[in-house]
Image: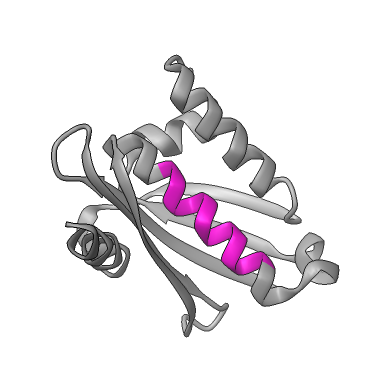
Amino acid sequence: MHFTIHADGGSRGNPGPAGAGAMIRDHLGNSVASVSEFLGTKTNNFAEYEAVILAFGKLAALVGEGRVDTTDVEVKMDSELVVKQMKGIYKVKHPTMREQYARLMHAAGAFKSVSFNHVPRAQNSDADALANDAMDRGA
């Protein structure tokens, strides 16, 4: 099985009211699940990580425990920082971000394979809208 996750997080102020959003699509590009969660007062980078962590949890529940380790996942996001940190290109220095990184690595480890790819904001509009909806609900 193969799924694509488009994820985005943001905050209004940094830190400020934050939200995480993600759209999960199957191998045909059909939307199969989404995430939109208000996170309270957080930084935008915290929210970017949290969007993917929440999406992995939703996807794991969707495919079921016995099938997670046979599932390939491609994560697309417009956060160059998170993508490069997950690829090992950038170091994770901030203590809170190290915790988020560890949580994301743990969540990703349940799947057969996971890749992270940077996309322009315009190609991440569904996830951006879900993150903004979450921030609107929390305001």
When the figure is inspected, residue 71 is found, relative to residue 32, above or below; the finding is above
Residue 124 appears in the picture as rendered: yes
Is residue 129 shown in magenta? no
Side of 10 where 84 appears, left or right: right
Side of 130 where 56 appears, left or right: right
Foreground of the two, 8 or 116: 8
**Where is residue 82 drawn, in percent x and y?**
42, 36
Count of numbered tags: 0
Foreground of the two, 137 or 72: 137
Residue 89 appears in the picture as rendered: no
When the figure is inspected, residue 45 is found, relative to residue 74, above or below; the finding is above
When the figure is inspected, residue 35 is found, relative to residue 110, above or below; the finding is below
- In which image quadrant can residue 14 be found? top left
**Where is residue 134 drawn, in percent x and y?**
28, 62
Foreground of the two, 27 or 34: 34
Foreground of the two, 106 or 17: 17
Determine the residue located farthest toward the right in the rendered image.
66
Determine the residue located farthest toward the top in the rendered image.
93
Q: Residue at x 58, y 67 (%)?
A: 58
Image quadrant in which the N terminus is located: bottom right
Magenta stretch, overall SS: helix
- In which image quadrant can residue 133 be found? bottom left
- In which image quadrant can residue 38 be found? bottom left
Is residue 57 shown in magenta? yes
**Where is residue 101 drawn, in percent x and y?**
54, 32
Q: Residue at x 47, y 80 (%)?
A: 29
Image quadrant in which the C terminus is located: bottom left
Span of residues in magenta: 49-60
Q: Residue at x 65, y 48 (%)?
A: 108
**Where is residue 50 drawn, in percent x and y?**
45, 47
Q: Residue at x 52, y 24 (%)?
A: 98
